[in-house]
Image: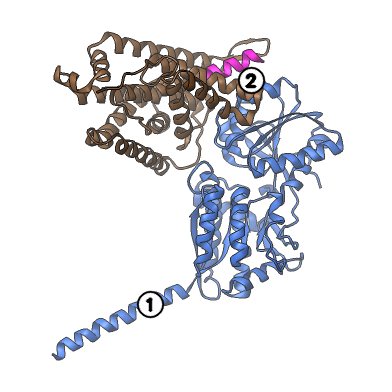
Amino acid sequence: MRSLKLARLAVLASFLILGAAGAAAAADTIKIAVPSPFTGAAAGYGDNVKAGVELKLAEINAAGGINGKQVVAEFLDEQCDPKEAATVAAKIVQDDAIVGVVGHLCSSAHLAALPNYVKKGIVAVSPTATNVTISEKNKDKAGKAWSYRVVYRDDFQGAFLARYASQVLGLKAIAVFYENNDYGIGLKEAFVKEAKKIGLAVVGEEGYMKGASDFTPQLTSLKSKNPDGLFISGYYNEGALIATQAKKLGMNVAKFGADGLDNADYIKLAADAAENTYMTVPFLAEAASADAQAFLKKFADTYKRESDWMSANAFDATGVVLEAVKAAGMDRAKVRDAIAAMNSPETGFKGITGNTYFDANGDCLKNAFVKVVKGGTFVPADKQME
Amino acid sequence: MLEQQLVNGLTLGVIYALIAVGYTMVYGVIELINFAHGEVYMIGAFLCVTFITAVGLPFYVSMLLAMICAAAIGVSIDRIAYRPLRSSPRLAVLITAIGMSIFLQNLAMIIWGSRPVPFPQDAVPAYLKLTAIEFSGVHLSWLQLFIFAVTFSMMLLLYVIINHTRMGTAMRALAQNRTCSQLMGVNVNRVIAFTFALGSSMGAVAGVLVAVYYNTLSPTMGYVAGVKAFAAAVLGGIGSVPGAMLGGIVLGIAEALGAGYVSSLYRDGVAYAVLIAVIIFRPSGLLGKALVEKA
């Protein structure tokens, strides 16, 4: 009898200890959600964001975590698809352990996920979503913004590109090739608007769908309008194919685009057709601080490839969220308030992409840099613009 | 501009045709839409690149090896996913086909990564990159001519196999009546396996040609190409090999003209509108025979 009782006690005790250990583990970590595309056509970008987040977490955890707690990230796949993004967002807001969101990557996905975050009160910091309408749709009834971004907006970028093409590159007639989604269209519209204002002619506009691989029909009709510049308002996968096919069709014009083109794969995929492509980027390694240089080196050592701006921005977006957690603790609303308080150069987050501070719309003011492909590699353009 | 658009469309079309053949032949013998075929096309391209980069083989040898491997993969797909369900309702096989497609796409992502990779250009014979013909603004590269040549010789080979060999006769017999041909001594499973091997190797050739032409390949490339090629097969008359050829070319040209003259955002819309129009007036496709329902 007695031995049986003892055995029971031992079992009970071991359960208790195990249970306590489990609870302790949960309380000892800080969890953030990273919704991005990890499968599907945009999975390559998701990989870059994931790499940036992982490096930031490794850095913080190696230094003892935040207030003694280790930080973990839950990576959720939304395939850059608005429907999937809304589903994933619903899942995130229900998980009480998650204090903040780093994401989404695509503007369309971010817009679809936003209503969930605003309604349930969790803050999302996007490393890459540049669409303009995000600034209008990210506030609750009290006027508090729940979505922030560490990247500039498309209207800034599009207008900047129009001025750069006209004033620095001296182009006269531009053909526009845009991806038919929030990013491509928003960027294109800002470009066309500014072009009209400064007297830069837009001779043709053609669209394409994400994941397309043949662009020769559209390029053939753009070519017939004799442009001297081709504006690719989209991402690097398709951008590389467009550059290659334009070259095959004998369309030897200056090419330029925005941050979506900026990836080492653009040059790998387009090879010599990538030459003389200009692009605006939020982050330029050559002009970066010592911290950023350390990041670039760490990235290359860890992942055996060159970092791009998406990884750098993901690194900083994670930094913004965790800085807020450090200051405000685990309460979702307080984390938001802490991010909203980063509203001046003095209170801004000093990251590798510069000093990030937000206005009331969750937008930040950052300058654009121009890179160009020369001799099979990205180099800073000879002339930058303020 | 019209000439250039026709060249663009034709290049696209013959590639669709090469993939469509795989759909149409399998449908011909077992009445199954092999949704995993697009993935075989993608894997064929990746295998060719792997042979070039990892093993260091020359371009043509790698392409040939990719064809052989793809044939083996096609046969395995049939053996694993379709043959055990040969006598099940057709819907069950259709579901396994879709499952196989998802499985293969994700497998490719695990093996080769999810990022698009460039085709190793150094391995491609230099003359293929040159412009062959250039007149009044029309550009035609040697690579495009190579694509046409490969496609047409493959089609010719296929024609000979189907119409002038014992295996081809068996395939045609199977297409007419499986039970009856079995009774006549045709080894049904062997003929089906052969059909898969033939279709899959054609798919692999298409994959390699596309990868070289666009200088890019990714694990998701099979999906869109598969859907388009399936549409081409239906357009030409599913079950008919010359129909697949014609359907591919018609679809490719419709897409190019639609994108060039109607609206670039509706290019797929224009292509599918052509498909629907044809199906309304000729339900069995351009070259399909009006089938009498089998007993």
Where on the picture, by quarter, is residue A145?
bottom right
Tell me residue A28's x, y (percent): 47, 74
Tell me residue A200's x, y (percent): 83, 33
First-in-chain label (1 vs 2) = 1
- Residue A275 seen anywhere in this rendered image of the structure: yes
The scheme the figure's colours follow is by chain
**Residue at the right extreme?**
A198
Is A328 in the magenta? no
Q: Is residue A295 left or right of residue B152?
A: right
Classify mark 1: residues with Cα within 10 Å, few (<14), some (14-19) or many (20+).
few
Disc 1 element? helix
- The residue under label 2 is A249
**Rendered shade, chain A:** blue
**Disc 1/disc 2 C-alpha distance (Å):** 66 Å
Classify mark 2: residues with Cα within 10 Å, few (<14), some (14-19) or many (20+).
many
User: What amino acid type should be assigned to the residue bearing mark 1?
Assistant: Ala
Where on the picture, by quarter, is residue A5?
bottom left
Badge 1: chain ID: A
Q: Nearer the viewer, residue A103 or A367?
A: A103
- The residue under label 1 is A21
Where on the picture, by quarter, is residue B189?
top left
User: The magenta stretch spans which residues?
Assistant: B1-11
Q: Nearer the viewer, residue A374 or B20?
A: B20
- Residue A163 seen anywhere in this rendered image of the structure: no
Tell me residue A308's x, y (percent): 60, 47
Which residue corresponds to the image point at 75% horizontal and 56% vertical from the top-left? A365
Badge 2: chain ID: A
* The C terminus of chain B, quarter of image: top left
**Rendered shade, chain B:** brown
Disc 2 element? loop
